[in-house]
Image (tube, rainbow, N blue to C red):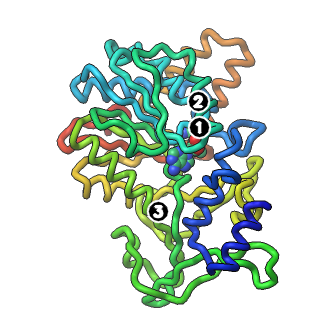
Amino acid sequence: MSLEEILIERIGNNGPISIADFMEQALAHPEYGYYMRRDPFGVNGDFITAPEISQMFGELLGLWAGVSWMMAGSPNSINLVELGPGRGTLMADMLHAAPLVEGFAEAIVVHMVETSPVLSSIQEQTLKKATLSEPPLWHKALADVSEGSSIIIANEFFDALPIEQYFKAGDYWCPRVVDVKPDGDGLCFVLLPPFDMPELPPGLVNVESDVMVEVCPPALDIMADISRRITEYGGAALLIDYGHSQSAAGETLQALKNHKYQNPLVDPGESDLTAHVDFGALAQRVFASGARAIGPITQGDFLCALGISQRADALMKKASPKQAKDISSALKRLTDVEEMGELFKVMAVVQQGAPVPPGFEQ
Ligand SMILES: C[S@@+](CC[C@H](N)C(=O)[O-])C[C@H]1O[C@@H](n2cnc3c(N)ncnc32)[C@H](O)[C@@H]1O
């Protein structure tokens, strides 16, 4: 039985399912979930992420983490937490740069928060060569990571969390859900009759009529937990993702397979499902949880402020002509406004009253 057949049977028995439920099944079903049984990264996969484009990305984030550790008072021990670590490349590159900040590498306890067994074992292999005072730890959720001073990094993690969509019809909100097509051959979206006002971020409450809005309750819950940890124990968080700086109406749920967009409802479990991250809603949750959100700013501005061009120049000096060409194209891909430089945003979380972390100074 395919996941589509399982969902068709379930909907036939119990009625339409929410989009969040559909996303959860498509991405994390124990047997058929997209992330549960494959390595989707790279040229031969479905998509490529910034750390897989160039080591420069992770190295700069490693330095960012080291300076943030110093700004937090250089504690003897600090959790270096990564949410959704993919192949483990970002963490490996961060650890590679960590010794450049004196005392930081020795203080690190690595925590990898990952739901996919396949990716967890790839991460384990990737981190085998890293020199660490304590072996890295794996967890299924942030809630399982020990409390304490933490640097928390999330690159393209929040976009994978399940969203809900609501259509505003006049003054009413109609939930959009997933149903079986009338001819029984596949899945389709339908609108349910309006019911109570959904819980919306402040920026979405007064949108005009005839628009779709998206909300991501798990993202807000995780953001609240990150903010609480930083408020109570110190440290910083860095979120990097594609999305919008302010809450806004619009439909952004998308499916990607072999680097091409697909219909999100076709072949569930076979393509990556994501939605743009609402940084406005996340920032609002940070402040409501007692911490301070800084940004978001664009990925291009952030990496340039951290010195990616200088790092690229240094690498190119020791590179072959072919390697130099690759470094130059990676720099463009990560920072150019036409590529990842503008769509991707970066937001930091620090304690109230803490100084602005590197990369965000005006
Ligand atoms: C798009 S990948 C990003 C990977 C990596 N950060 C990178 O930049 O290459 C999303 C990652 O989040 C993981 N993931 C998705 N949902 C998750 C959840 N609810 N909890 C923990 N990890 C999750 C996936 O298995 C995958 O490792």
* For residue 114, above or below residue 128: below
* Residues at marks 1 and 3 touching, judged by CB atoms closer than 8 Å: no
Whether residues under marks 2 and 1 lie with C-beta atoms below 8 angstroms apart, the answer is: yes
Name the front one of labels 2 and 1: 2
Location of residue 196 by image quarter = bottom left
The residue depicted at 17 percent of the width and 41 percent of the height is 353
Q: Is residue 91 left or right of residue 27?
A: left
Give residue 86's mark. 1
- What is the three-letter code of the residue carrying label 1? Gly
What residue is disc 3 on? 216
For the point 66% across and 53% down, the residue is 33
| Nearest the eye: 2 or 269 | 2
Q: Position of residue 103 (x, y in %)?
A: 32, 14
Q: Residue at x 58, y 26 (%)?
A: 124
The residue carrying pointer 2 sits among few (fewer than 14), some (14 to 19) or many (20 or more) residues within 10 Å by Cα, namely: many
Instruction: Left or right? Give the position of 13 relative to 242.
Output: right
Distance from disc 2 to disc 3, alpha carbons, whole Å, reads 27 Å
Percent x, y of residue 207: 42, 77
For disc 2, the marked residue is 123
Q: Quadrant of ligand 1?
A: top right
Amino acid under disc 2: Gln
Query: Residue 94 location in percent, x, y?
Result: 48, 24
Q: Position of residue 153 (x, y in %)?
A: 43, 37
Q: Toward the viewer: 253 or 341?
A: 253
2 or 3: tag closer to the N-terminus = 2
Q: Secondary structure at mark 3?
A: loop
Type of amino acid under label 3: Cys
